[in-house]
Image: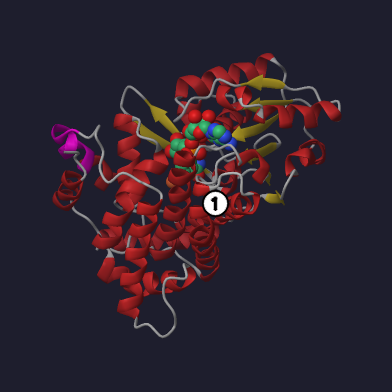
Amino acid sequence: MLHQTVIQIRAQANKLIPIPLPKLIEGEGAITQTALALTELGGIKPLIVTDAMLVKLGIAKHLTDALDAANIAYALFDEVTPDPTLQLIGNGLQEYKRNGCDSVIALGGGSPMDCAKAIAAAAVKNVDAKKLVGMLRVRKALPPFIAIPTTAGTGSEATLVAVVTDPVKKQKFTIIDPSLVPAVAILDPLLMLGLPAKITAETGIDALTHAIESYIGYHATEQTKAYGYDAVKRIFANLPTAYADGRNVEARRQMSIASFNAGVAFTRASIGYVHAIAHQMGGYYHIPHGLANAVILPHILDFSFENALCRYAELAIAAGLATAEDTQVAAAHKFVAGVKALNKTLNIQTDFPELKANDIAELAKRAVREAYCEYPVPKLMNRTQCEALLNKLVAG
Ligand SMILES: NC(=O)c1ccc[n+]([C@@H]2O[C@H](COP(=O)([O-])OP(=O)(O)OC[C@H]3O[C@@H](n4cnc5c(N)ncnc54)[C@H](O)[C@@H]3O)[C@@H](O)[C@H]2O)c1
Ligand SMILES: [Fe+2]
């Protein structure tokens, strides 16, 4: 009861706090438009926030070439590692200040994009990023900020969230503020052609999870449902191709749009238990975010079935798994079966070898606490139910 009331109050509050949409620049070679976009935002000397792998693969060079061609000086911070820590963000902030930067360009998956958001927020507030953890602690416009995703999954290029990790507490925390929505998002499928099949699959299911969790939760609106529906449609139509043939530009392009749209949906309508549990897997065992979601998603779809049946039925049509001729129940079943089949096509594992039975009580406690009064889930889960679910995911 308390949960329902708080969720309803939050839904009303959400409507009062406008969330901006990034300006979208999309298509093959879109990265060449970065310099112009930066200049239009008033940026003169950006800090590029990326990871060493993207530099090694030559992906960062597409960006630096575009800036060089426009005679824009920049500083490069390429130390981001998966699941950025507060310490790492601090290092990036030092680089930003040391080089006299006035803007930020994030290039990479969710890890560089979130690290960049936290650096930019810490810079504008002139505080340690630790002080910004939580809701609406930034309340100030970021310096000119451009996000260029190189995975199609997190949707961070469209969201008001930065996920940061505290390795000591083995926990993920969020900085949530509308000012964290990037001013510009540049989606360039050519940057994603070499993304390994395994990461393509896992990040793709992260995007699917954003679309589904936002669609079935109580905060969904007609607008967020339209974005989520569109994302589900594009993901079912293109993720198997992007996985099997990574160099298929159109499949990559469709996935990049799907990820963006799913980001737009969930940043307004929130997420659910798949993420609440996946965050614990990331914080505790460093399991990649997309993989954690992919393993957990089918279980939560089963758990919420009766309460989310109508929405599943709608998504079954989006996914091309059912038609208007199907009954709602039949369509809903087809949707759950379709997600499970997609996981199989993508060779997603079905358990976590890292998960220790001894940790389950604490993990379940944290997951249930993260979701309670925060995530507008269609069906509440108690600790015992969460423990039972986690027990199914122990390997062996
Ligand atoms: N802010 C948000 O809204 C939001 C939403 C969901 C998840 N997240 C967070 O995002 C992080 C995960 O991001 P991610 O799944 O994109 O992974 P990631 O950024 O950690 O990258 C994973 C790996 O893929 C490599 N990679 C990235 N792009 C590549 C490319 N084009 N070619 C070859 N290799 C490439 C990277 O070098 C890295 O080794 C987690 O910390 C998660 O909690 C944030
Ligand atoms: Fe996610």
Residue drawn where x is 45% and y is 46% of the image: 201
Q: Residue furthest bottom?
A: 325
Res 107 quadrant in image: top right
Residue 134 seen: no
Q: Nearer the viewer, residue 286 or 188?
A: 188
In the picture, the quarter occupied by the N terminus is bottom left
**Residue bounds of the magenta highlight:** 356-364
Q: Secondary structure at mark 1?
A: helix
376 over 242 or under it: above or below: below
Main secondary structure of the magenta stretch: helix
Q: Residue furthest front?
A: 245
Residue drawn where x is 22% and y is 38% of the image: 363
283 over 337 or under it: above or below: above
337 over 257 or under it: above or below: below
Count of all numbered marks drawn on residues in the image:
1
Which x, y percent locates residue 130?
45, 27
Which x, y percent locates residue 39?
82, 36
Residue under label 1, please give it: 259
| Type of colouring | secondary structure
Which x, y percent locates residue 88?
50, 21
Q: Nearer the viewer, residue 359 or 11?
A: 359
Q: Is residue 227 magenta?
A: no
Residue drawn where x is 35% and y is 59% of the image: 341
Which x, y percent locates residue 145?
67, 37
Residue drawn where x is 38% and y is 74% of the image: 313
Dot 1 amino acid type: Ser
Q: Residues within 10 Å of mark 1 (few under 14, many from 20)?
A: many
Q: Nearer the viewer, residue 206 or 189?
A: 189
Q: Is mark 1 within 8 Å of ligand 1?
A: no
Q: Is residue 340 left or right of residue 29?
A: left
In the picture, the quarter occupied by the C terminus is top left
Residue 200 seen: yes
